[in-house]
Image (tube, rainbow, N blue to C red):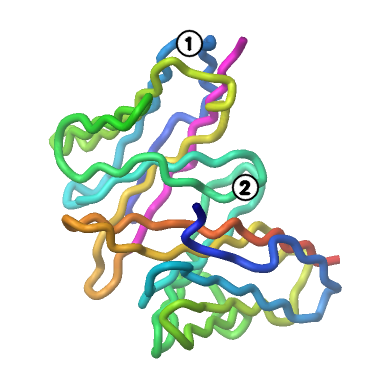
Amino acid sequence: GAVVSQHPSRVICKSGTSVKIECRSLDFQATTMFWYRQFPKQSLMLMATSNEGSKATYEQGVEKDKFLINHASLTLSTLTVTSAHPEDSSFYICSAERQEGAGNSPLHFGNGTRLTVT
Amino acid sequence: QKEVEQNSGPLSVPEGAIASLNCTYSDRGSQSFFWYRQYSGKSPELIMSIYSNGDKEDGRFTAQLNKASQYVSLLIRDSQPSDSATYLCAVMDFTGTASKLTFGTGTRLQVTL
């Protein structure tokens, strides 16, 4: 079953408004979560690394004041897209690393959030 | 800039055949490798992970890793139409305190009847 839950799965908002996306690890604690964005027919691009109890680490070219990340607990990270514009329309996916023994720690992904900004 | 290269495809195989998906990576120091399956409009689903040279089998899937050649592959035996999806190769690197996953652009697999 799913190990990472993401909500909402789909959101449509008007230009200039803000949208919050939640990502939860379901049966494990995740000190680090990752936020990806995927445009049509392209691969996943890492936006930022969310660190529990500290500031997120943003990838080059990603505006930290536009994409606010909060990782307030070991099972929850949120991404808020502020003052959304049509070019922010994309598929946003969170992931968390789950320790699975013997040094194995694959990333598991949430179901993604399809954001459409009109 | 770490890179992960995949042929975008589409790779078309008949039902029941073996599908072979390939991936190369640029960082010789990379240690962890993953194959994800992504259906259109959905998020990636972990298929296989491999950490050491050689083959790793799980059901119809076999991952192969050759660190000397910086090459990782995924074989799908007895391909089914439900295997039709985009397969993403991913390489994980550790940067100080955090790990970072770099994805290839994916190979689209079509299994035909």
Question: Do the residues indicated by labels 2 and 1 lie within the same chain of the protein?
Answer: yes
The crowding category of the residue bearing disc 1, from other C-alpha atoms within 10 Å (few below 14, some 14 to 19, many at least 20), is some
Chain that bears disc 1:
B
Say which residue label 2 marks: B42
Q: Quadrant of residue A41?
A: top right
At 59% across and 54% down in the image, what residue appears?
A38
Which type of secondary structure does the marked residue at label 1 adopt?
loop
Image location of residue B97, percent across then percent down: 25, 75
Image location of residue B5, percent across then percent down: 38, 38
| Type of amino acid at the residue the image marks with label 2 | Lys
The crowding category of the residue bearing disc 2, from other C-alpha atoms within 10 Å (few below 14, some 14 to 19, many at least 20), is some
Q: Nearer the viewer, mark 2 or mark 1?
A: 1
Q: Earlier in the sequence, mark 2 or mark 1?
A: 1
At 50% across and 52% down in the image, what residue appears?
A1
As rendered, which of A76 and A41 lies closer to the eye?
A76
Mark 2–mark 1 distance (CA, rounded to whole Å): 25 Å
| Type of amino acid at the residue the image marks with label 1 | Gly
Say which residue label 1 marks: B16
Which type of secondary structure does the marked residue at label 2 adopt?
loop
As rendered, which of A61 and A97 lies closer to the eye?
A97
- In this picture, which residue range is highlighted in magenta? B100-113
Query: In the rendered structure, does residue B31 fall within the stretch colored magenta?
Result: no
